[in-house]
Image (tube, rainbow, N blue to C red):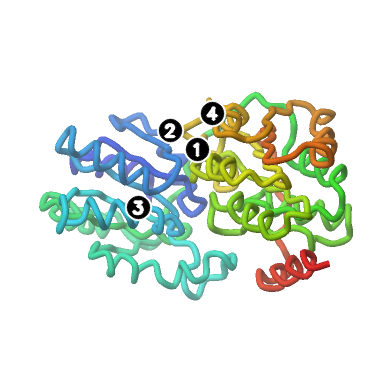
Amino acid sequence: MRADRLLEELGKMGIDTIAGVPDSTLKQFCDGLQNYEGNLTHYVTANEGAAVGVAIGSFLASGRPACVYMQNSGIGNAVNPLASLANGDVYGIPIFFIVGWRGEPGVKDEPQHVFQGKITCELFRTLAVPYHVVDKDTTEEELLVILQEAAEILKNNGQFALIVKKGTFEKAAPFLWENGNRMRREDVLGQTLKVLPEDTAIVSTTGKISRELYEQSNQIYGHHDNIFMTVGGMGHASMIALGIAKKHPDKKVVCIDGDGAALMHMGALPFIASQAPENLYHIVINNQAHESVGAMPTGCRKTDFAGLAQAAGYAHARKLETIEEVAQIADAVKSRKGPVLFEIPVSLDSRADLGRPKESAKENKEGFMSFLQR
């Protein structure tokens, strides 16, 4: 299935607006979307619920249905506006969903996707959203029949979901861009680990940040027991770190976040500031992209995270733009009262041979909990 052909057919259905959050299963679709030259307005939103909001507003203004794309892990973010606004028992807003199916039963995947994969279709049934599953064997003729069904549902102000298996879309010309930043994320993370006291509790966000920290910590410390890798639940690492910091006020807690994750639940910043944990240090690694799922730019590339943290009420916030400045994190952790936020701009580089944790999620949890009790 070619992304541009699907987009052309969506246009014939009256869809001229598409919003969503990038997904690795939809990587080829996202590349095709970024390179698409048709009449389509595209928004990369902070989270999937926001994409549903854009779709609702677009319909109210134009009378045209919109398309929302996401990984299936984002369904949870979309449930509230879908169930309490778009559903036919409320306003009846037509929306066409394209959902990447991670954790498909019977297909090996990462632990954070397993349960979500099991309940993906059931969730759409519960939400009263008709759906079809497509894969690499779905013919164009079969797709057109599915889209005809979807078009009728949209005309009646309903919603429809296309659930997409891995490998469904043909490879498209990759969407390439540069953010202009010089520091490599892996170098920044390595430097951070080297200067932090080894007894620092670290909470890392989902994606390549956790994977790189896992490898770096094993090399530097010989273990990774002091790192809780938030492999799923994008956007919640900082609140997990807050929960730990409040229970262990005697321990330094560092949250290593990503810009896409921080954007997803931005309300965490003022809440952390209001709780005023003096032992919490928040690092936002900013490459202006959803790099772990294909490097599509975020829709908020001009965001000044240090400025936002300062305005939210953090005790201190600063942007660090050289490796030498990154080393100063250690002094701040030792001498400054939190909450403190450091924003670190990095490039889009990452190793092709980057590994994944060898232990299970539960084993890593137990190791981290044991570390906290030492």
Q: Amino acid type of disc 1? A: Ala
Q: Residue 103 placed where, x, y %? A: 50, 67
Under mark 3, the amino acid is Ile
Residue 167 or 350: which is nearer the viewer?
Answer: 350
> Residue shown at 44%/72% (left/top)?
118
Q: Which mark is residue 303?
A: 4
Q: Given the image, on which type of amino acid does mark 4 rest?
A: Thr
**3D distance between C-alphas at marks 4 and 2:** 24 Å
Quarter of the C terminus within the rendering: bottom right
The answer for how far apart the CA atoms under marks 2 and 1 are is 8 Å
Circle nearer the N terminus (1, 3): 3
Tell me: residue 210, above or below residue 361. above
Residue occupying image coordinates x 53% and y 57%:
233
Q: Is residue 290 above or below residue 316?
A: below
Q: Name the residue that disc number 2 marks.
A: 35
Q: Is disc 1 surrounded by few (<14), some (14 to 19) or many (20+) residues within 10 Å?
A: few
* Label 4, label 1: how far apart the Cα atoms are: 28 Å
Three-letter amino acid code at disc 2? Asn
**Residue 179 position within the rendered picture, expressed as x and y whole percent measured from the top left:** 61, 27
- Count neighbours of disc 4 (C-alpha within 10 A) and say few if under 14, some if 14 to 19, many if 20 or more: some
What residue is disc 1 on? 173
The picture quadrant where one finds residue 272 is: top right
**Which of these two is toward me, 151 or 122?**
122
For marks 2 and 1, the one nearer the N-term is 2
Q: Earlier in the sequence, mark 3 or mark 2?
A: 2
